Image (spheres, grey):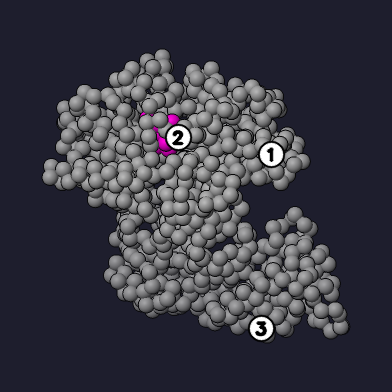
Amino acid sequence: MNMMIKAYRRKLDVANGRVDLSHGAGGRAMGQLIEGIFYKAFDNDWLRAGNDQSAFSVPGGRMVMTTDGYVVSPLFFPGGNIGTLSVHGTINDIAMAGAVPLYLSASFIIEEGFPFADLERIAQSMGAASREAGMPIITGDTKVVERGKADGVFISTAGVGLVPDGLDLRSDAARPGDAVIISGSIGDHGVAVMSKRENLEFDTDIVSDSAALHGLVADMVAAGGAHIRLMRDPTRGGIAATLNEIASQSRVGFRIDEDKIPLKPQVAAACEFLGLDPLNVANEGKLVAVVAPESADAVLAAMRAHPLGSEAALVGHVVADDNCFVQMTTSCGGRIVDWLSGEQLPRIC
Amino acid sequence: MLPDNMAKVTLDGVSKIVSTALIDDVRPGDYLVLHVGYALAKINPEEAERTLALIRQAAAMGDAG
Amino acid sequence: MKYIDEYRDGRLAKEIARQIAALADPARAYYFMEFCGGHTHAISRYGLEDLLPANVRMIHGPGCPVCVLPIGRIDAAIALAMRPKITLCTYGDLMRVPGSNGSSLLKAKAAGADIRMVYSTLDALRIAEAELEREVVFFAIGFETTTPPTALALKAAIAKGLGNFSIFCNHVLTPAAIQNILESPDVRKLGTIKIDGFVGPAHVSTVIGTEPYEFFAGKFQKPVVVAGFEPLDVIQAILMLVRQVNDGRHEVENQYIRAVTALGNEKAQAEVANFFELRESFEWRGLGEVPYGALRLRPQYVAYDAEKRFSMVTPAAKDNPACECGAILRGVKKPADCKLFGTVCTSDTPIGSCMVSAEGACAAHWTYGRFRKKARQVDVGRAVA
């Protein structure tokens, strides 16, 4: 975003205009788009400096870096849009290391014909989300591709954060006896997005749980410190995929209790309609924490005291298991919770 | 109830439009068995209660045994 | 969720299981087949097998429409979908079903075929109306539950004069398959079949009623209990089957009486009869040729029959010879008895039909029941001792 705009030009018609190929061509039109939509929405000195990169001082200690791509369809869904999702998702990837988020980047691949108004709405909500989290978007990029080469807009981000001293969360750190805590009700995001998908359309007041979890994580770290073994945000593939991932990386098994997993009745009902298992449905504002047993109560109490963890629940424990199975006690007996195979599709029978 | 043999069905705050073309006499408040977007049958509330009563009765015997 | 949550009460299920254990004769074993994939799913999903005494065993039957669709039909659909101007609409379950040489509809879609997942036949009809320049083919599969919706879509297409809509019909029939399991000469080849009774389908029976089961309950002297899809429904049906076996009865009983009548949904049956007729024989993946086991469009609707309209050919295609799906579908073998199970054949890389759909016997065992294998062997050993 190295555009310094001086000459007078017709104002960007945000209300009615559309992105065309000139907005990605590196000329004045591109500068106008960046100035008129992104600078305005993200609004910070780094961007206004107009460099190809942004400089910041590195604090001492360990840093984390993450990158993520966003291609959600539909772009706007109850409780958020691709923009809020990209900010929250990147912050959460940073936060799952126990880290404090510092800076974000955002790169936009826009399909020719995409309305300025939608782009502005997305950018505005990204700006708001990043300000709320105290993690400014300090550099970015814009590309425009021909119609049909993208689906409206794709966003890719990167983020950096700082890990507090003494904290070293690792995916292979789960040990038998550790407690498994989920920060709140599962499946809200997936159901909210699916409710707007073509052919699946159904009405529900469920909204996406999209949220930045670094504040919750900070409270957990204060309460549990190094007794927090690891954290994950169960996005695509849901809780089932996350627990299986941890199990295979830590070479352990899980034993969880279905009755203890927080689940909204509307999400349960939507899954009933569609023949889906809520354990496979995506979340965007929840985390799974594996915590040493001696600190489980303290971490759980800290989570419940935070607005994003008020429904947090201890759902089970890590067990020794060479097969790395995630076992779940059901109301009647028990079963294995497996990864989802292929894409999650409604069953017909 | 909607035109063209369609109806809105609701379950715990989630609603969906389904076809009722395969069953007769659907009335608001009926409970339906759904499959691939169609209602296949109505739930008979008396029989549903009777089944539950039978289940509870069997369960009570299991408890005693 | 009314009429759902009440039937998922684990405490009641456990008490009924205790009743089953009290009634089951310890001197014998009871083998019951749940024909329908929906029941297989419920049994696995809620862990009902954990509740049953070791001498009451469930055999997972062939009632999963995706699983019994022969490879040749998938190959034919893929070949059709690759033709220009064709839009193939299908239920999501079919997308991953393996055809020959590792092909699938999902891969054909990636290779450029216009294949769309639909939730209902109405969606396929809408696509045909909206895109008149495309030939929209609905890949119709399923048992008696999905056939009436196909019939209604066809009826609507005719009423609207939609010339670009047609049906690739693969609808199959439950009673024919149950009879095939009980009397096929293959059974002798595969081993002695030991089925003491059937848990009859839930949704299928809402359409066909309980009456069609009377014939083979009498002829083969096997009790049938039609049951709902919730865990309490299934466990109550098992209790009813144990009672019948103990009493030496072989009746058709209806546990799912809240939705199933003796004659079923006659309106749906009439719609089906208007548009479909029996096929003399149809291949079921795993079972082989099943006489009168499937439906096709009546000759007067040839214009809507994709097989005729596009001169589709169903190539002969063979399953992996090591695959035990045939024996598993008949209840002669268990998923874990198959050499391919869990080695090359997993839910991510299904080889045989039983692994393909979440409701197939192997997929259900892979997804939910694998960990039970060792524990179960110990249980059975104890029961025998």
* Magenta-colored span: C201-210
Q: Front-most of C302 and C172?
A: C302
Q: Is residue C223 above or below residue A114?
A: above
Q: Label 1: state its secondary structure.
A: loop
In the displayed structure image, the side of residue A51 where residue A58 appears, left or right = left
Tag 2: amino acid: Asn
Above or below, A283 against A3 in this view is: above
Residue drawn at x 58%, y 76% as measured from the top left: A129
Name the spot of residue A306 as percent of width and height, x first. 40, 77
Q: Do labels 2 and 3 share a chain?
A: no
| Residue at 41%, 60% in the rendered image | A265
Q: Position of residue C355 (x, y in %)?
A: 46, 36
How many labels, in total?
Answer: 3
User: Between disc 1 and disc 2, whose residue precedes?
Assistant: 1
Tag 2 secondary structure: loop
Judge whether residue C204 is colored magenta: yes
Label 1 marks which chain's residue? Answer: C
Residues under labels 2 and 3: Cα distance?
66 Å
The residue labelled by disc 2 is C265
Which label was assigned to residue C160? 1
Q: Are marks 2 and 3 in contact (CB under 8 Å)?
A: no
- Relative to A93, is B48 above or below? above
Q: Is label 1 in contact with label 2 (beta carbons under 8 Å)?
A: no
The lab-note entry on whether marks 3 and 1 share a chain reads no
Amino acid type for the residue under numbered disc 3: Asn
Along the line of sight, the residue nearer the viewer: C220 or B53: B53
- Residue under label 3, please give it: A44
Gap between marks 1 and 2 measured at Cα = 26 Å
